Image (spheres, grey):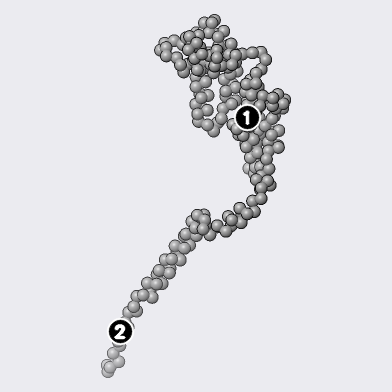
Amino acid sequence: MERLDECLKVHADMLDAQNIGSIYELQGFSELHYYLKVEHVFTPAEVEALLSFQDPLDVARWCWEENNHEHSFPICDLLKEIDAEQKFEHFTSEPSAQDKYTLLMKRLGQNYFAYRESLMSRDKESLIEKAAEITAMQEAYSYLTTKFEFRDEMLDDVLALENPLKYFADRWLMPVSDVFDVDMDIRENIAGIRDSQEYLCQREPAVSVLARLQNAAQEVRECPAAEKPVRDFGAR
């Protein structure tokens, strides 16, 4: 059942570390993988049935979620219950478009984490100098793995690259200031400084001190001066 190992590695490579749900999903795959490899006693029919699918670990997960048997895991029966033959892609020796897409996501993940690892040995000054490059790499990875829809005919070309992430990051969009005229926005922002929360909060302590001094001076002006005592210049 080496295919189970490969499937788990693929799911791990596709993990979105910023998504809690994705982390929990990988944990579920890991626990099921351990059960299947260590505890479950497979029948020959179960092995044949699972290996007929492109991702036997994912199929087994669906079976696991639908299993109502308290002390057993009858995989063949559960495959029928979830209509696996119609729901899941079957294994073929020729990589399918889904296989290629999965491989691409895996490679992008490997490229990204290898790049991050290369940054660990750098000092702070060099990291600051590479800030634009780091941002491009992060944005490219996030967009390519979560938003961009790769068409089937694109996959072979992208997979021809050993480091497709660097290829796209090197060509990533220029900063917005190089693409759009932002002068008007900057002028509007300058005009709004005196009314901004940042300015008012920054000015508040000085204003408070000045206000207290002004109030104290006002109280002095409003308070009548005390009458001076009359001195007696009479004979001693």
Whether residue 163 is situated above or below residue 88 in the rendered picture? below
**Secondary structure under the numbered disc 1 in the rendered image:** loop
Whether residue 150 is situated above or below residue 187 in the rendered picture? above
Q: Splitting the image into 4 quarters, where does residue 13 fall?
A: top right
Mark 2 surroundings: few (<14), some (14-19) or many (≥20) residues within 10 A: few
Q: CA distance from mark 2 to mark 1?
A: 95 Å
Whether residue 91 is situated above or below residue 22 in the rendered picture? above
* Residue position marked by numbered label 1 in the rendering: 149
Q: Residue furthest top?
A: 44
Which amino acid type is marked by label 1? Answer: Glu
Please give the name of the residue rendered at 59% of the width and 16% of the height, measured from the top-left corner: 89
Q: Is residue 158 left or right of residue 202?
A: right
Q: Position of residue 73 (x, y in %)?
A: 46, 11
**Secondary structure under the numbered disc 2 in the rendered image:** loop
Residue 78 has which mark? Answer: none
Please give the name of the residue rendered at 55% of the width and 31% of the height, measured from the top-left corner: 17
Closest to the observer, 229 or 143: 143
Please give the name of the residue rendered at 66% of the width and 50% of the height, measured from the top-left corner: 181
Closest to the observer, 157 or 228: 157
- Name which of mark 2 and mark 1 comes first in the sequence: 1
* Residue position marked by numbered label 2 in the rendering: 229
Please give the name of the residue rendered at 42% of the width and 12% of the height, measured from the top-left corner: 69
Mark 1 surroundings: few (<14), some (14-19) or many (≥20) residues within 10 A: few
